[in-house]
């Protein structure tokens, strides 16, 4: 486990409810497309790695698949049992999964490679547990960032927040470009065939208080940055959040935030 992995485990501990309220619906958007890319259908055995609150697992169950839902965070698994009661729920941490080689027809990982310190090793493990001819499908957030993600940076800058140089990061030699070409290259390097990668773009609609609740409750890197700010700066961040997010409000008062994700898939030979 890398230092980045240790940071991720600490960052997500006990935060499933805050995630479900804030970022959970955002991350749910590509779920059906992810399952399509993995070719998930009735009768297949699918492993949902990094299941979170179980959104993807529940949709796979609705397709008639036999689903195993995996996550490293126990509080997420509690939600997954509620959301996807027909799934087998397993606690495990990439890059080690407690499954035999070639036992699954498909593996999906929705916004998981963003959260591991060795993406290539994690992807290799996803491939290991899929039978020849089966498929692996993953999503990540792109870089350069779309407007939704850039908004938080604008807010921190306007509030005079400190963005520490010592933030946990994936080691450069283990990282990859968060672009269509970079993600496709990662899958190809893992030995996957028929690799495809596309950008999914959509507008995320969210209640402003729910969207604020993610970083305010310590979710992800934004949450870590928020925790490191003095009280006065956190108050200014909230003021700038209200000010700068106002341009994205619709007539009903909801935020309408343009965003995008990368979806890639490939076949195990």
Image (cartoon, rainbow, N blue to C red):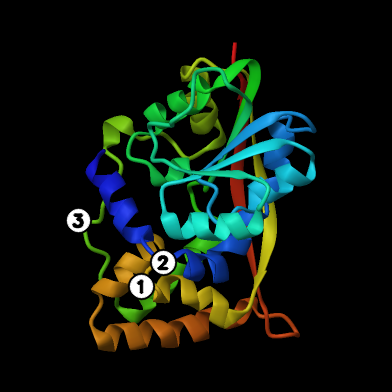
- The residue sitting at the left extreme is 166
Query: Residue 49 placed where, x, y %?
Result: 52, 40
Marks 2 and 1 in Cβ contact (< 8 Å): yes
Given residues 191 and 69, the one toward you in this image is 69
In the depicted structure, whether residue 205 falls above or below residue 81: below
In the depicted structure, whether residue 173 falls above or below residue 252: above
Residue at x 47% of width, y 64% of height: 16
In the picture, the disc for residue 222 is none
Could you say whether the residue bearing mark 2 is in a helix, strand or loop? helix
- Residue at the disc numbered 1: 157
In the picture, the disc for residue 153 is 2
Q: Crowding at label 2, few (<14), some or many (≥20) Cα neighbours within 10 Å?
A: some
In the picture, the disc for residue 166 is 3
* Mark-to-mark CA distance, 2 and 1: 6 Å
In the depicted structure, whether residue 168 falls above or below residue 230: above
Which picture quadrant has residue 45? top right
In the drawing, does residue 28 fall left or right of residue 159? Answer: right
Which picture quadrant has residue 79? bottom right
In the depicted structure, whether residue 124 falls above or below residue 258: above
Marks 3 and 2 in Cβ contact (< 8 Å): no
Residue at x 31% of width, y 66% of height: 224
Query: Residue 129 placed where, x, y %?
Result: 52, 23
Marks 1 and 3 in Cβ contact (< 8 Å): no
Q: Earlier in the sequence, mark 1 or mark 3?
A: 1
């Amino acid at each position: 486990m890398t230092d980045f992995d240790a940071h991720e485990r600490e960052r997500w501990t006990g935060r499933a409810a805050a995630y479900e309220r804030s970022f959970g619906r955002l991350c749910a958007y590509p779920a059906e497309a992810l399952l399509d890319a993995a070719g998930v259908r009735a009768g297949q055995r699918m492993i949902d790695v990094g299941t979170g609150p179980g959104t993807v697992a529940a949709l796979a169950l609705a397709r008639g698949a036999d689903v195993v839902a995996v996550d490293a965070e126990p509080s997420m698994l509690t939600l997954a049992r509620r959301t996807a009661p027909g799934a087998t729920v397993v606690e495990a941490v990439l890059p080690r999964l407690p499954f035999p080689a070639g036992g699954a027809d498909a593996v999906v990982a929705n916004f998981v490679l963003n959260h591991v310190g060795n993406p290539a090793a994690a992807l290799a493990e996803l491939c290991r547990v899929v039978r020849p001819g089966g498929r692996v499908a993953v999503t990540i957030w792109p870089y350069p960032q779309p407007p939704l993600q850039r908004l938080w940076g604008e807010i921190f800058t306007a509030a005079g927040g400190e963005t520490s140089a010592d933030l946990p990061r994936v080691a450069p030699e283990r990282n990859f470009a968060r672009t269509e070409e970079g993600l496709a290259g990662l899958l190809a390097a893992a030995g996957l065939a028929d690799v495809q990668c596309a950008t999914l773009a959509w507008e995320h609609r969210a209640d402003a208080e729910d969207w604020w609740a993610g970083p305010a409750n310590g979710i992800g890197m934004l949450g870590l940055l928020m925790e490191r700010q003095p009280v006065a700066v956190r108050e200014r961040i909230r003021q700038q959040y209200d000010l700068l997010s106002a341009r994205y409000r619709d007539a009903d008062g909801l935020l309408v935030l343009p965003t995008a994700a990368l979806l890639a898939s490939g076949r195990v030979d």
